[in-house]
Image (tube, grey):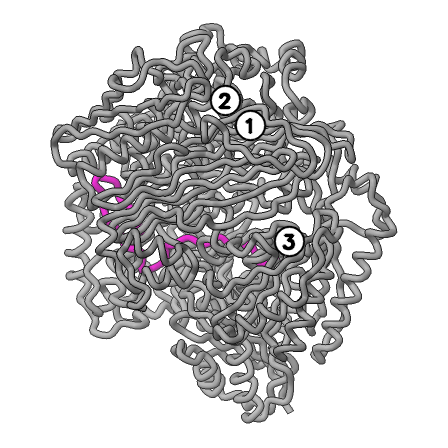
Amino acid sequence: MAQWQVGVDVGGTFTDILAVEPESGLWRIGKVPSTPEDQSRGVIAGLESVGVPLVEVAGFVHGTTVGTNAVLERKGVPCGLITTQGFRDMLELGRRTRPNAYGMTGSFEALVPREMRIEVPERMGAAGQVLTPLDEDAVRRAVQALREAGAEALVIHFLHSYANPAHELRAAEIVRELWPNPYVTVGHDVLREVREFERGSTAAVNAYIQPLMSRYLSRLAGALERGGFPRTLLVMQGNAGTMTAKGAAEHAAQTVMSGPAAGALAAARVGVEAGMRNIIGCDMGGTSFDVTLIRDGAPAISAEKDVAYGVPVRVPMIDIHTIGAGGGSIARVNQAGLLQVGPESAGSRPGPICYGRGGTEPTVTDANLVLGRLDPASMPGVESPVPVEVVQAAILEKIGKPLGLDAIAAASAIIAVATNHLASAIRLVSIERGEDPRDYALFAFGGAGPLHATALAQELGVPQVLVPRFPGATSALGCILADLRHDFVRTIGRPLLEVEGAAMEAILAEHAAQGRALIEGEGVPIEGIVTVHEADLLFRGQSHVFRMAVTLPFAPAEVLAQFTARYRQRFDIELAGMRVVLANLRTTVLGTRRKIGMALFAPEAVGEPVPRTSRQVVFGTKAWTTPIYRRETLPAGHVLPGPAIIEQMDATTVVDPGATLRVDSTGNLVISVGAAA
Amino acid sequence: MSLDPVQLAVIQNGLRQVASEMDMVHQKTSFSPVISEGLDRANGIYHRETGEVIAQGETGLPSFIGVMQFSTQHIIRLRRDLEEGDVILVNDPYLGGTHLMDVRMLAPFHYRGKLWCHLSNTGHWSDTGGMVPGGFNSTATEIQQEGLRIPPVKLYRRGVLDEDIQQMVLNNVRVPEERLGDLRAQLGALRVGARRLTELLDRYGADVVEAAIEELKTRSERLMRAHIATIPDGTYEGTAFCDSDGVVFEKLAVRLRMNVKGDRIGFDLSQSSPPCKGPMNTPRDLATSAVYVAMKHVFPDVPINAGCFTPIEVGGQDGTFLDAQYPRPCAGAAAEVCQRVMESVFAAMGQAMPERMFASPFGTSGNFSLGGYDPEEDRRYIMYMFSGGGYGGYSEGDGLTNGCSSLSIAKTQPIEVLEQHFPVLYEEYALREGSAGAGRHRGGFGLNYRVKLLRGEARASFVMDHGVTGPAGLLGGGPGETLAIEVGQGGARSLPPHVSKGEGYALEPGDWVQVRTPGGGGYGPPAERDPAAIARDLRRGYLGPEQAAAEYGHKLAAE
């Protein structure tokens, strides 16, 4: 019997499915409309569309937006909070911010409203010493009150619980006695790290989406089971690892950013197999552009992300920088006479003018159409096609005339400004880490990524672009490739040279054992367990930590030497004589799943490909006669000079003049950028 | 040289990015929490001759946006001997400065052997000496009491550190090893900026970039003028009061007259109070800069460069407390008086176009410093804390609760981090109930915190404001609640005589400080507030039934 590995990524518009059978090398790809009211219906429909029987599925990994969207739209469940006396408003006060640097307006609603937050007498000191014992009766009264007020989930969040979790643990015990409820989130359990607002917010996000995730995943698991799926459903986490659906329902905060994380992971893996270990993942869809830096084959992970204004989530997540720029981004000329593209987007309703859904504002997609990069005859999502002349006239009227340009030049300007905007996002992400984008290759995916990647690479001075076999299904691919993963953190907060190596090793060993136990309990076939330890360090008095890998045995003096050297390398600053503090210890435990090689995606085509057609495409200021190829007709090893356009079901790749395309052995398109035309 | 729209946008982003990366390095490597957590710092690129700002980092402290260009102009005027590799160190408030704690550095930037621009930054050091740890001495009457005043000296000459100057500075500040870290962080930022700017110029060519800078300035100016033209012509007035100068208990007034004609706008400050004894005197350039920041809050989309300030005329400071002259103390200028100036601009704008404005925000940085000795760690420390408050209501909604001060984008430090570092215990850190100004859209709420000293001894000082008059409402909205400080020493409670300012409170273990910050002003008549919103506020305990009845005529029976 075939043993299919299935990855499913549910996006805002489409649900993408990729199914792979490693033994036979078969694969199937599918795309169906998402079903936001119950995403599991779209998932099942997608599975049916690729014709893989559930009994033959050996692994099923799911990337989901259920949790992220619930936070963004404030559609989570009613939650209650039990917290330290004097601190009930923490989630509402935040750390004194405003939504934008300039402008004195805007609003914020905490995930848990004030009437659902109750204080109890208890207090730990910063060193974990009990200053006020826990008032257990107060906890009992609080549970009762919150239950009566309609709470479906509870958060228990006490000050300094990262240093001593005893009160949180006892309170949780009391809660569970009185109210057997699976939805109780305990602060230190979600994040054993200092900073009360961030830890509390992470716990609140967890509680807020946990029942939704749990219900959704059990619905999906049920549907899969009824269809004959014999294994455990896995869910993608924001850290680009997977865990079981049961685990995801408990640690719901871990699923935030699950889909984009899968995309970044796939980018890293495809890059490594293509011989490119340093790449920048560029995922461009209709409304957003996600950038991920992948260094030495591993995507950067950050624990400093905010899901929305005032809602930080401090669990490790793939460090994805998102800007509002996509095919639907609207171009306009501002009052100063400057051309701006985005951040407003026409979205999918009304969408770009060319979609014929009533859009009147020129967008990036419209400009691509006018320039000949997109084929008006095969635009996805078009309802009643709008003639190119109409789109052209709108661009002339709204952009060309104010800038003194004709329609074609105006469309070129829109693309150029959009490209520049995308380029600044890439520069920001790379330069923030002290990396020069020119040392990287661009990995273009998402529906619109391959359309802009070559021009983007030229703008940045990046020498190569990699377009994977299925740009539109990259996140689904990432789901198939992901390992099981669990992260742990413990705040230490003591001078590095004063800690005992053995005590630190004990903490790291405990992390490793916890991770191993979790993975073993998940019942998913794995090939091995990999454990990685890291330390967060800083100079006493600073507040930003510097993270670096550590190995066992933990020798403080050696760690110190490594830290100062790496610090100097990064910031060009030497701080000899300053005391170094060990802020946190971190551990990642991976359960590695069977590797799937990209070779099975190698093209079947042979011989000299023939262009499907050709048309006039504008690059820079000039129109070029450009051949149009179907992607499936390009054999491995084939080389094409630009300009050329490669079409496939899920994306269009543009090879600019001066660039050269080569099809590699696994079917990736590798574009050597050359100089700008 | 003609520039296409693309190049222009690219260069605009490029320059801003150089400054943003300087900001990032500065923040991540600093030792003063007020910089690393609070982002109380800014980095920018300035014109080599005029000193005008070319670009500033996106996360720079707003109140530094205008003032650093003035400071650069003073340095250019006073130091005709700038050479490649020099780094100027200065904190003189009278030379385009703020208060002594804001330490500025400037490095002339050379490209291919020629002076091309200046790179500069400012960082708020936790201490620069003086009578009071942290520098906020509310009773100072001369600048010498406030700390070390550094004229524009060369910390580096042609790339070589002047160790004498460095040691001279470090010998006169508290916790010198951390201050050295702050100094290095600032240098690191300048170095990174120079490297990135060189790359930008290599890439696009110095001539092209220079032409773009000129063009961008013109564009910003045009955009600002287009906005000004939408304000109805006329003369408007805005007044804001400081509680006192900390020494003489009398209100100080910022009286502003705003003249709008077509696309020009003028602000006249000449009716403001005369110079004061205490530390609320404000350097004139800082007052000007505060008007700029207020304008930027009203029209946030104008890119920051010298062009956006060109259409704005500010004057009349002469002879008022908004023209600090040596040796008048000015510790409260940057954090407090600046916000009064901004408030007066908001108030005048509120008369001119109330439908587009917001009621007054809480308007105080809530500067609280605690300097002491921790016997357990055998360590002297300075804890500097600032706090948020309520924003004003506006046409579309209620004001934000515990927002950041208008001149800043600084986040407050986590309580757990403060308790790790200092021998204090926060007994309460909460929303201040009942503090919002009533209105159709009420203000946001202030903060209420109480902190206790656990061990050793310490001295507390406060420079805050809005303790006597609350932040004003707009279009019939009520004022936000006033700020209140209370100190408990040996079981006795007291209120500072100057309400929002006080100095030298000696604390013993168990003694405490309680601070309640103002709420924002309300917008529109309270009678027009949606009863459902009042009921929700009552349910949440944002205000009590008596207050709801008094302010909104809300009847409990109606629920």
Say yes or no: labels 3 and 1 on the same chain: no
Tag 3 residue:
A159
The residue at 78%/35% (across/down) is B376
The quadrant of the rendering that contains the C terminus of chain B is bottom left
Give residue A264's position: percent from left, percent from top: 55, 61
**Residue at the extreme front of the image, as rendered:** B492
The front one of A413 and B128 is B128
Q: Which mark is residue B461?
A: 1
Q: B263 left or right of B106?
A: left
Say yes or no: labels 2 and 3 on the same chain: no
Report helix, strand or loop for mark 3: loop
The front one of A496 and B161 is A496
Which tag, 1 or 2, sits closer to the chain's start?
A: 2
Q: A128 left or right of B491?
A: right
Q: Is residue B84 above or below residue A614?
A: above
First to last magenta residue range:
A316-342
